[in-house]
Structure formats: structure tokens, C-alpha cells
Image (cartoon, coloured by chain):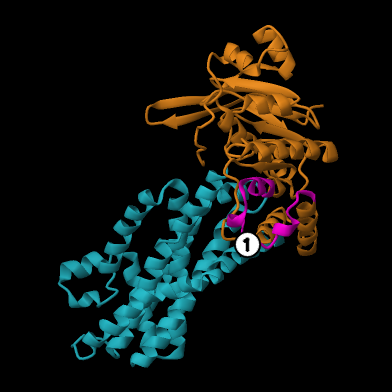
Amino acid sequence: MPTFLSDTALVFGRYARQTLRSKLQILFGVLMPLLYLLFFGPLLTDLPLSSAGSSWQLLVPGLLLQLGLFGAAFCGFGIIIEKQHGVVERMRVTPVSRLALLLGRVLRDALLFVFQSALLVLAALAMGLRAPLAGILIGFAFVALLTVSLASLSYALALKVTTPQEFAPVINAVTMPSMLLSGLMLPMTLGPTWLDVLSHFMPFRYLVDAVRAAYVGSYASSAMLYGVLVALVLAAVSLAVCTRTFRRAAA
Amino acid sequence: MPVLSTSGLARTFTTKNGPVDAVRGIDLTAERGEILGFLGPNGAGKTTTLRMLTTLLAPTGGTATVAGRDLVRDPAGVRRATGYVAQSGGVDPSVSVREELVTQARLYRLGKAQALARTEELAADLGLTELLDRRTAALSGGQRRRLDIAMGLTHRPEVLFLDEPTTGLDPGSRADLWELIRRIRADHGTTVFLTTHYLDEADALADRLVIVDRGVVVAEGTPDSLKRTHAGSPDASLQDAFLAITGRPSAPQDQTPVAV
């Protein structure tokens, strides 16, 4: 389907240029995880965390997914602003592929957050992180998959609401428990059994565990298997839901 | 053979308080090269009808053919043959005029070189050449409107839908825009389907008017024939005819536009 691909490239190009115009925004997304890295990371170095590898191999995977989680969940803001300018409808009355309107945006987001992740990993290397290159690359792949899932869902929600005031509370209500229950900062195995059990119902936990496994070079582990499965299912379901929303909204 | 025709076109919305019939069955036609004014009081179903004709909203009843394509069975075909300029325009304030025009042409699947050439051509035609490298946020109201219309003309549509094209413009820019709309029709034979709250605009610009109220067409004809039939004389004002037909004035002119 060459028109679908060229449509996607066109939409991607438009939003990539938009991102490149605001260089500050590119760096700003790294700020929160970077602060955790600088001021929270050093607290962990001498703690008994009962995990393989150093505390950095534990913390950095969590910060990468935190970056993806908070970054992607708020992607929908952009589309709310565009709706107010009439940009979304203007594109929907053109013959452009509905799926391309979604995928072009989501690809831009995935690339942006992987780039920010790379900056974060560079900073972490300076702080003392040592991890296998393959593991680090696998970590980026998980950030990309998480972004595809969450950014799609965020866009779908944003299409249905009219103001940022309706959008933000929902996103906050999802992201905060997601962060706490997936053990982004510290592994859930440190906690009491009930909390550990509860966290297994949080899909992001499997992604964090998988990236932690990758960072200690344990590629053939069950954590990796579950992580890959959950990430793929999450991305497939999210894309399906959102494509439907984009089609419906477009009638 | 009309370029646009609808038969019983209807849309019912499901709400918490039960179904709401926004449009209850619209029958209308537009001939090739005609400027058709689509009028009605607030809430009459103008916007809903326009959103259906531009494929933004699926009808729940009736049929329509636009530029030879069935609205329900071939929405993609309708999109290729029509242009739509919403009240809110549709350009990103942070993007340059040139980039918006090129992107728009590419969204209509023109090749890269064709898109660049079409951008130059449209800019020259609509007096935007000097503005091509400005961000759209820096344009005046009249310039913005010309850009919005250029965006709608990118693919040389057979039918151009304009939703309240002159709302918020100063009198000079309104007059310029009327001239532009007449010229588009004269040069390209484009059918122009426009909604407006300004009855003087409808009177001056439209060949024929269709007036809707409560989701159905309640009157149609040339401005003069409507004035003669409903206000007693072709010298009467269109406002009088409109009042006689709908029992309500056209929307107050200070009404702030609502972006949908």
C-alpha cells in the first residue's frame, strides 16, 4: 500500500518538523528522569536491593519507562490544541489515510522519546551505569513500544474531549498509579506480598522487569518473555482501539 | 444534472435525554458553477448538514450525491472532489504559509514537485506570494481567510464548501472576499456552497438560497424571488423575508464563532 506509507511519511514529517522547531521541548522531557537520576540514584548505591547487578542497572530501566509513560500519556495535548485550530478536521476532509494520521504522529513520538532515552542513558553512564550494549538497545525498543501504546490511547482520548481541563485529570489518574504500581523506582519484590501481587495486575510492571533483565544481560529469562508479550499485546490493542476511534471520528 | 443533490438527508444524535433529530430530512440540489447560500437560524441544522456533506459526520438517513459520488458508499471519492473551509480555518499558527500549502497539496496526494508548483500558482492567484515564508500566526484576518480558501482549492475541487467565510472580518476584507469567491466561480466553474449569518452577504453573493429551519428546508429560490414571495416585494430586505419564513432573525452579528 504505497499511498498509506507515503501518507504516514508525510504526517510524520509534519510533526517531526514541529518538534524540531522547539528544541527546548526536546530537552525538557528528559528533565524529570534526569533529576531522579542525579538526586535519587545516589541514594540507592549502597542499599541492599537483592538484585543482580548494580543499583544503576535497576534504576535506569525504571527511569526510561517513566520517561515513556509520562511523555506518551500526555501526547494527546497536541491534538486538543490542533482541534481548536481546526487542523484535525481540515486533514480529515482530505483523502489521506486515517491510520496514517495516527501512525505519523505516533512514530514521531516514539522517535522523540527514544532520543530522550539515549540522552538519559548517556547521563547515567557518567553517573556510573555499566550495562551491555544489547541490553541498552533492547531498553530503547521497549520505550518505543510503550510510546506506541500510550501515545495512541492518549490521542484517542484527546479526540473525544474538547478541553485540556477534561483531559489532564484522566491522564494524571492513570499515570500516577501506573508509576507506583509498576515498581519504576524500586523493584516490587522489596515490598510486602500484597503489594507485589497487586503490581502483577499492572501491565507496565512486566515491561520494567524485562528492561531490568536486559540491563543485566539476562536475555533468555522469563521476565524478558513476559515483557515482550505484554508490550506487543498492549501495542496491538492500543493501535486497534485508536484506529477505530480515528475512523469513527472521521465517519 | 446537479453537481450536488440530497434526498431526505438526516442525522439523529443519541444523547442522555434520548434521540435528538438535528437534521430531519434535507432535500436540496446545487447546479454546476452555482453559488448557493445555505441559511437558517441558530440550531436549524446548518452545521450538521455541512458536516455530513463534507464526510465529517455519517448521515443516519437519506442519500446524497456529491460530484457524482455517493456520500455514504464513497466518502473518499467525495473528499477528492470537494474542498472544505471551516469557520476556524485549519492552519497551524506555528507553521509557515508555504509549508501549510505544500502539506495540504501532499495530503491530496500531489507529488512533491507538483505540490510546490501548485503552491506557487495558488499563492500568485490569491495574493499570498509575499507571505509564503511568514508563519500563519502573523497574517491579518483577511490574509488568513485567503490562505484558508487557498487550502480548500489545492486540488481544484468541483465543489467548495465555505462555513461562515466572512465572520469576524472587517468590511473591506469582506468585500475583497466576495470578489474572490465570484472570481473562483468565474475562472474555474467551481460550485460554491456557503453558509452565512449575514443576510446582506447572502443577498449580494448567492445565486440561489436554501433556508433551513428545525432540520428541514423551509424555503428556496433566488434572493429576489424569496423577497417577492415572502416579504411582498423584490425591494424588501432579505431580513424581512427571512423573518417571515422562519419567525426568527438570522443570528446576532456579534455572536462569537464556536470552533467545532
Q: Is residue B141 magenta?
A: yes
Q: Position of residue B36 (x, y in %)?
A: 72, 28
Q: Image quadrant of residue B236?
A: top right
Work out whether residue B237 can be spotted.
yes
Q: Given the image, on which type of amino acid does mark 1 rest?
A: Thr
Q: Which residues are magenta?
A: B125-148
B146 vs A118, nearest the viewer? B146
Residue A135 vertical position relative to residue B164 in the rendered view, above or below? below
Q: Image quadrant of residue A175?
A: bottom left
At x 61%, y 40%, the residue is B169
On screen, residue A46 versus residue A113, left or right, reads: left
Query: What SS does tag 1 mark?
Result: helix
Q: Position of residue A215 (x, y in %)?
A: 37, 86
Specify the subunit that label 1 lies on: A
Q: Position of residue A192 (x, y in %)?
A: 15, 72
Quadrant containing the N terminus of chain B in the rendered view: top right
- What residue did someone put label 1 on? A8
At x 43%, y 51%, the residue is A157
B252 vs B172, nearest the viewer? B172
At x 83%, y 40%, the residue is B188
In the image, the chain rendered in orange is B
A80 vs B2, nearest the viewer? A80
Dominant secondary-structure state across the stretch colored magenta:
helix
In the image, the chain rendered in cyan is A
